[in-house]
Each structure stands twice: as C-alpha cells, then as structure tokens.
Amino acid sequence: MEISTDRDQELATAATGGDRNAFEILMRSSQQAVFSLACRLTKNESEADDITQETFISAWKHIGSFRGEIPFKAWVLKITLNKCRSFWRWSNIRRLVSLDQDTDRPDEQSLHETIPDKNLPQPDKAFESLDHSEKITRALNALSLKQREAAILRGQGLEIREIAAIMKTAQGTIKAHLFEARRKLALTLREGL
C-alpha cells in the first residue's frame, strides 16, 4: 500500500499528535519496505521480522521527534538501518563470547531461500530466477557495508538526499558509494554470467 507524499505528510503530522490510526496507516504503507531492507541486510527472515517489529515500536515511541524534514518512509527506514546495525554489533559480540561449540551449522540462508517468489508460473523460470537472485545476493554481499546500504536504500526508491539523511553522510559521498556499487555489481554480475 503506497500513499502519496502529501497524504503521507498529513498522516505523519496527525501521528506526531498522537493519532494511532494515522500511525497505523503509515506503518502499513511502509511495512514491506522495512521488512525488505531488514531481510536484505540481515539475510535472515526471522531477524527481519523482529527488526520490523522493533522498528515500528521505536517509531511510535519517538514519533514526537519526527520533524518532516524527510518523508516518513525514509525516517522509518533510517530507524530500520540503525536496528540492523545493532543486530550486526550484537551478532559479532555473541559470536566472540559464545560458549556454543556447534560450529558445523550452515551459514545463514540465502535471500532466495528466505523469500521465495511464489508468483513464478513455470519451474524452469523459477530456477532461472532463483539463480539470478542468488547471483545478485552474492554481488551485494561483495560490496562494502556502506555501498551495500546505499544500494539497498536506493533500491527502495529513496532519493540521494533521503539516503544521505538516513546514513548521516554527505550526498556526494552517497553518490560515490552508489557509483562504486553499480560498477562492482555490473562487473560481478557480468563475470557470473
């Protein structure tokens, strides 16, 4: 459910005043984008579900701090990005101090296993699509963290200025990250074909 920017701003204004219904509409309109970003960054559907919930709980708690300088969707994706960064920090800490000796577990599921495309009509096309999705996922994972974040946020349809605000980085730096990400993705995908 996509809502217009003007309507989005009206709802955000109402939500900052404590209107739960307005917040719920905003939440539903951006829920898929939040989950998609969390899933791409964590590569784990269960963690993405948790991060999505945490994002909206945090957004509701801090809705009074929303100033409308960026659209609500960009603001909530900024919260999502911060939640994902916390997830990575805690994952690294847990890995370092873990007493769990079970190191034979396979790595995290790939994105195509986590979010299969159920709308594909033919098995052979499904295989081709999954193979392509796997190549894209590997190519994204080969990027630096900042390049990957910028590319995924751009893939969510955000403008350069919104990505810069979310990542707390200059627009020129975001452009450089996106330029390098595009170059590396094209090269990696070309080599993988």
Image (cartoon, helix red, strand yellow):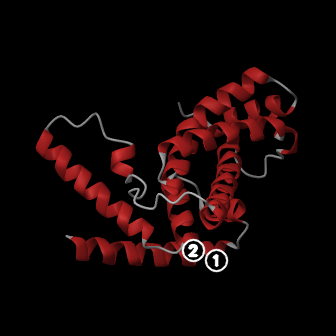
Q: Looking at the image, how many numbered discs can be counted on the residues?
A: 2
Left or right: residue 140 compared with residue 113: right
Q: Closest to the observer: 104 or 173?
A: 104
Q: Amino acid at mark 2?
A: Lys
Q: Which of the numbered marks, if any, corresponds to residue 180?
A: none
Residue at mark 1 to residue at mark 2: CA–CA distance:
5 Å
Q: Quadrant of residue 186?
A: bottom left
Identify the residue at horizontal 74%, vertical 36% (top origin): 57
- Residue 151 picture location, percent across and down: 50, 64
Label 1 residue SS: helix
Name the quadrant of the C terminus.
bottom left
Q: Are marks 1 and 2 in contact (CB under 8 Å)?
A: yes
Residue occupied by mark 2 = 175
> Is 13 placed left or right of 189 in the picture?
right
Q: Is residue 185 above or below residue 63?
A: below
- Is label 2 in a helix, a strand or a loop? helix
Q: Position of residue 141 (x, y in %)?
A: 44, 67
Q: What's the residue type where badge 1 is placed?
A: Gly
Q: Is residue 20 visible?
A: yes
Decide: few, some or many residues near mark 1? Use Cα within 10 Å; few <14, some 14-19, many ≥20: few
> Does residue 3 show up?
no
In this view, 124 is above or below 191? above
Q: Front-most of 93 and 100?
A: 100
Residue 75 position within the rendered picture, expressed as x and y whole percent measured from the top left? 71, 49
Instruction: Identify which residue is drawn at 67% across, 32% down.
Output: 26
**In the rendered image, which quarter is residue 22 located in?**
top right
Residue carrying label 1: 172
Q: Is residue 164 left or right of residue 179?
A: right
Q: Is residue 28 left or right of residue 60?
A: left
Residue 7 in percent (x, y) is at: 68, 32
- Residue at 62 percent across and 65 percent down: it is 92
